[in-house]
Image (cartoon, rainbow, N blue to C red):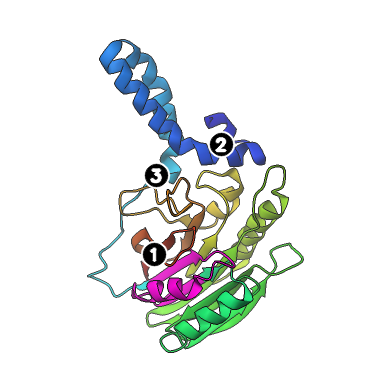
Amino acid sequence: MIVCVWVPGVVGTAAAALLPWCGLALGVLAVVALLLARRVLLVLLVPILAWMLAIAPSAPGFASGSADESPGVRIVSQNVRAHSGGAAESATDLAGSGAEVIALTELDADSLAAARDTLAADYPHSYAVGTVAVWSRLPIADAQALSLGLDWKRALRVVVNAPDGDVAVYVMHAASVRPGVQSERDAMLSGIADAVAADSSGSVVVVGDFNAASADPALGAIRSHLDWVRPTDGALGFTWPAALPLARIDHVFTRGLTVLGSTTMRAGSSDHLATVTTLAF
């Protein structure tokens, strides 16, 4: 499984989704060995240590500061599931988190309109394109749509004018992965990596639905340019499916910012949990 995670394409994508659960299997084997054959524990140390090394880049982390010490900027992001009719409820719940910036993906025309109506009063600054949109309590500038190598636009970039400085915020909704079909997703992930590599902004945040588990080799390019934000609540930060999260496919990447907190929350009736990230300059 560890070797498969290094293989680009469908093999690496599938292995990345299964890798965290190998730890659970190893844990069960360790308990059985402890009860029935303790000498086998020595043999299990090899795959256990290998798994720990493989999962380390996707493991939980620690906040770099305290939200009480710095005002920070809170950014929340959620895939609201198109045609679910839950966008307004999601928007209400996310606004209740105290976020300065709300990013929504997989929006259809009706859900976009519902979210706009819900957020208009408290989030006067917004920009939407395709299936993605962003709302902000703070002024935004330089809004632009991004195609990321595809023929349609499923990503955007805005500059949020925060009190302590400007932040380039990217929101993306990667193409779906289906058996034998993931070239469009891989193209978008490569495209977002190229975009942030060329971005001269000192502070950058990328949020959204990447349709890729944390260890997916397709995320390697963006990981080389930005820091993957680790969950700071002690969990692995799984976001999908919301009823029983099995994988983290909604991510946050940053550059030039300090992570004060990173967690997930339920919002609306979406099949994705939302990511909640508090950042400071």
- Region rendered in magenta: 74-103
Q: Is residue 38 visible?
A: no
Which circle's residue, 2 or 1, is located before the other in the chain?
2
Q: Position of residue 55 (x, y in %)?
A: 44, 38
Q: Vertical placement of 14 versus 26: above or below?
A: below
Q: Secondary structure at mark 1?
A: strand
Which circle's residue, 1 or 3, is located before the other in the chain?
3
Determine whether, in the image, residue 34 is placed left or right of residue 92.
left
Residue type at the position of mark 2: Ala
Q: Secondary structure at mark 2?
A: helix
Determine whether, in the image, residue 105 is placed left or right of residue 232.
right
Q: Position of residue 29 (x, y in %)?
A: 37, 21
- Where residue 113 sits, quadrant-wise, is bottom right
Give yes or no for contact between labels 2 and 1 (Cβ–Cβ under 8 Å).
no
- Label 3: which residue? 59
Task: Decide: few, some or many residues near mark 2? Use Cα within 10 Å; few <14, some 14-19, many ≥20.
Answer: many
- Label 2: which residue? 15
Residue 190's mark?
Answer: none
Task: Decide: few, some or many residues near mark 1? Use Cα within 10 Å; few <14, some 14-19, many ≥20.
Answer: many
Foreground mark, 1 or 3? 1
Residue 79 within the magenta-colored segment of the rendering = yes
Foreground mark, 2 or 3? 2
Residue in the foreground of this view, choosing between 172 and 109: 109
Residue type at the position of mark 1: Val
Residue type at the position of mark 3: Ala
- Label 1: which residue? 276
Residue 150 within the magenta-colored segment of the rendering = no
